Amino acid sequence: MVSKKPRAGAVRKKSRGAAVGSGGQGRQALEGRGPTPKAEDRTYHPKGKAKLARERFLAAGGKDARKAGASGKPAARAPKKTDDTELVTGRNSVLEALKTKVPADTLYIASKIEMDDRVREILGIATRRGLPILEVMRAELDRMTSRDTVHQGVVLKVPPYEYAHPMELLEASYEKDGLPLFVALDGITDPRNLGAIIRSAAAFGSDGIILPQRRSVGVTASAWKTSAGAAARLKVAMATNLTQTIKAFKEQGVFVIGLDGGGSVELPGLALADRPLLVVVGSEGKGLSRLVTEQCDAVVSIPISAATESLNAGIAASVTLYEISKLRASKHG
């Protein structure tokens, strides 16, 4: 192999060295400025405005939906709240909730919301009620609600309902007139049925409603609205175990009747109407559970036309309470 040697007289090019610096020239022009502030620390920047809105939201009692991961970046939108706090969303729903005096903590309004008659009325009612009104960025409302919710720039925060204790309600009823009348729900999951039953119970002199802790609807904003304000006057109690609560009522001299289409006792002229009573209403599909049925002193049916298969739970409760009220009135003048 013949090695190549540079030709005589050839000049080898030198590799380019590092670029010559400024030698510190202009350094004084940069002194004192420091690093550029983060976007969220600049109040004029969109991220800075969002940060200020979030701080106002947190100051009003909201929870930060952003959870930083290891990278320090915000995670995806947090899921909807899992506690008993309820969010009523949408202009029509919020307006109806405020009109029916659903208890509320805070009204959230999107910044620069497009005003219409509904928004003006919402703000007017909230102002008259002294309800805190918080203006937040629309992105915050998105984080507060679920992905498939259309909030229309308006969200109403409803606090958890404060349930009474069943035995305390029973004691208060005995002290009042000595003739308790309660309604217990067994497997009712539709809030509109609950609201209708609360409304009927209040109209016909019931002393309260008892809900089981499991497999049952609670007093939501929807139930409150359907009750037409009766939920503000009639107490609702929560039973940890409905069967055990029924047993405790029976030990205190209360008779228990269950409503069922196949009941052996017909409602008209009910002999137990003038006794302390607990009326148990089952779900439309499954009816009364076996354990609850075993505790009933009578299983009562409502005579209806053969062309109708069954009655809605709310209607059945209303008819029963009316009949009991009528029989009690005729018995006691």
Image: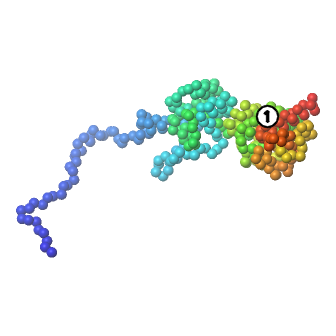
On screen, residue 121 above or below 78: above
Residue 10 picture location, percent across and down: 8, 62
Residue drawn 80% across and 48% down?
A: 288
Give residue 274's quadrant in the image: top right
Residue drawn 92% across and 31% down?
A: 330
Residue drawn 44% across and 36% down?
A: 46
Q: How many numbered dots are placed on residues in this image?
A: 1
Which residue corresponds to mark 1? 200
Along the horizontal axis of the image, is 127 left or right of 70?
right
Residue 111 picture location, percent across and down: 51, 31
On screen, residue 98 above or below 16: above
Give residue 165's quadrant in the image: top right
Q: Residue furthest bottom?
A: 1
Please state, as top left, top right, bottom left or bottom right, where the C terminus lies in the image. Answer: top right
Residue 259 picture location, percent across and down: 83, 43
User: Closest to the observer: 145 or 48?
Assistant: 145
Residue 44 picture location, percent across and down: 42, 34
Along the horizontal axis of the image, is 122 left or right of 298?
left
Residue drawn 76% across and 47% down?
A: 285
Please state, as top left, top right, bottom left or bottom right, where the N terminus lies in the image. Answer: bottom left
Question: Which residue type carries mark 1?
Answer: Ser
User: Closest to the observer: 96 or 68?
Assistant: 96
Give residue 331's quadrant in the image: top right
Question: Badge 1: how crowded within 10 Å, few (<14), some, or many (20+)?
Answer: many
Residue 242 appears in the rendering: no
